[in-house]
Structure formats: structure tokens, C-alpha cells
Image (cartoon, rainbow, N blue to C red):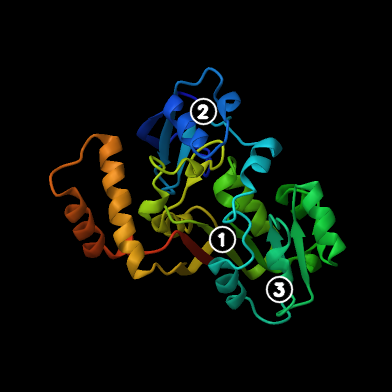
Amino acid sequence: MANLKSPVTNSESIKKVRSFDAQQLQKDYNDFGIDVQNYFDGVKTVDLYECIESGLQFFSPNNIVGDGKFYESIQHFDWYYKDDKWEFDKGLSLINGGEKVLEIGSGRGQFLKLLKQKTEHAEGLELNESAIEKIRANGYKVHLMKIDEFEQQLHQDSLFDVVCSFQVYEHIDNIGEVIQSSLNALKQGGRLIISVPNSDCIFNDPILNPFNMPPHHQGLWYPSTFEKLQSIFNIELTGVYFEPSSFINKFRAAAVDCDIKKREGTTSSFQYYNSLMRIFKEPRLQRGRTMIAQFIKK
């Protein structure tokens, strides 16, 4: 604990939020047909901490990180690599025609394909070599490189108007360094567009959603985190956008909230009614699973 630091600020200004039983977490993954036992060798408890300055929550130990084999085991889920994501459409609407765009974590190139509607000046970064082969075969420019390596090669006249990422930042341990490298790749006045899971959404509560925990996710993002990043980096927040949530999802969320209370051992009489009233009374709980923030580099 003495050496544990915030992955955003690298400071010891952190606090413990809660703990999770590692054995239960492995069981939750097993329920989806995914064996993660090897990632938890010798780990009994996974602790969740919060960076006081940024509000980002992160897990400890920080070495429970998914590798290629792990991601191969989850990519068969139909929701994992969807081509028609809300955040793609919203992200595209935030980009102007002809702008020079860099996407961090291009996956199979879904967003690069959409970007053709707006600009011919788009590039991607990706670490999956097989994915890169497919992207390049479709005629898109993509680099097998991390953002910190890539931005060091850029000259002032080769900086980007927009750097964007979709469902990437929550997988990264050293996120503060990655944010700074992303900003280094931007022109002054350029825009950083970040899409991450909305941790205010009940469906994303890690107690019932193992995919929002290690070895899959390394951090939990809240809307307030975006606001606080302005005091850490030389950026200005210009907008936060939330995936719409259907009316029926509010009732489903109440059922999930009941299950969370049961897992926590805090359920009470009329729990479903209580959960439903809580969701309808708190607007933030009615938002969808995903959120996007846009920043301007000062």
C-alpha cells in the first residue's frame, strides 16, 4: 500500500473504495465460459482504489492484465466487436470534414471505415498484428505502435486535429501517461475524444459485471472524472455525451440493482420497488452504458 500510486497523477493521494473476493471473481468469469485462474495466481483479494485528484477508480494488484489469449476468449461474444456502436456514430458527428484524425486502438478498423465519410486523413494505432493485417488489406493506414512511441516520432507539422479512442482507456494501467501522449500528438486547439463505459450505469457495476474488472478492465470512469481531468492536464472539457437508455432498460436496471443488493447482503423488503424508485429519481442512473467526452487542448 505504501508504494501504491494513482495511475493518473502518480501520487499517493488515493483512497480505498471496496474489495472483491478473487475466487468469486474467477467464478463470475467462469459463468461466461472464461477461465481466468492463471491471472489470479496467489491473489485472494482485488481492491478498488480511487485517485482523489481525478476521481478515476483503479484496481490493485495492477498486474492482473489480460493477454492475447484472454481477448481471444471473449471476442466471440456478439457485443464485443460490433460495427454499429452508438459511440461510433456520436464520435463521427464530433469530427469535421477534412480533419486529420488519429484513432488509438483501431480493432478491426470499424471506425476508420466510418471516417472515410468525413476525411481522407485518418490513421490508427493497433497492437493486434492479425487485426492490423485485415485493416491494411482494406486500405486503411494503421501502425503497430503504442501512442507514447508514435507521438515521439511526430513533428510539429504532422500533429493531428483529433485524437480519439473508443473503449480503450479503461483497459490501460498507466492511463495518465497515455493521456499525456495523446495530447502530445494534438495540435494546439486540437480535440481529444474519449469513449469509455459509464460507471454510473448500474449495468456496469463490477460486483455483477466481471468484464468491468481485471483482467479485462483496469479502471472505472465516472462523468465527474472528465471534469477533474481539466485540473491535471492542459485541456478544457467541451462536452460529455451519454448513450441513450430505453424505457424498458430502467426496469431491467432495477432487477440488476436487486441482484447487487443480494450479493452485498443488503437487500430488504420490497427491494425491487425500492430499486425502481431509486432509478427513476436519480437521472444519472437512467443514462446508458457508454459515455463520450470531448476536450480541447489549450
Tell me the element at label 1.
strand
- Which residue is disc 2 drawn over? 61
Tell which residue pokes out farthest to the top in this image: 42
Query: x%, y% of residue 8?
Result: 52, 44
Tell me the element at label 2.
loop
- Which residue is disc 1 drawn over? 194
Please tell me whether residue 14 is drawn above or below residue 239 in the rendered image.
above
Give the number of the disc on residue 115: 3
Say which of 18 and 138 sits in front: 138
The residue at 56%/41% (across/down) is 216
Residue type at mark 2 is Pro
Residue type at mark 3 is Leu
Q: Which image quarter is the C terminus in? A: bottom right
**How far apart are the alpha carbons under marks 3 and 1?**
16 Å
Task: Describe residue 74's horizontal placement relative to residue 123 as left or right.
Answer: left
Numbered disc in front, either 3 or 1: 3
Q: Which image quarter is the N terminus in? A: top left
Q: Is residue 153 visible?
A: no
First along the sequence among labels 3 and 1: 3
Query: x%, y% of residue 33?
Result: 55, 37
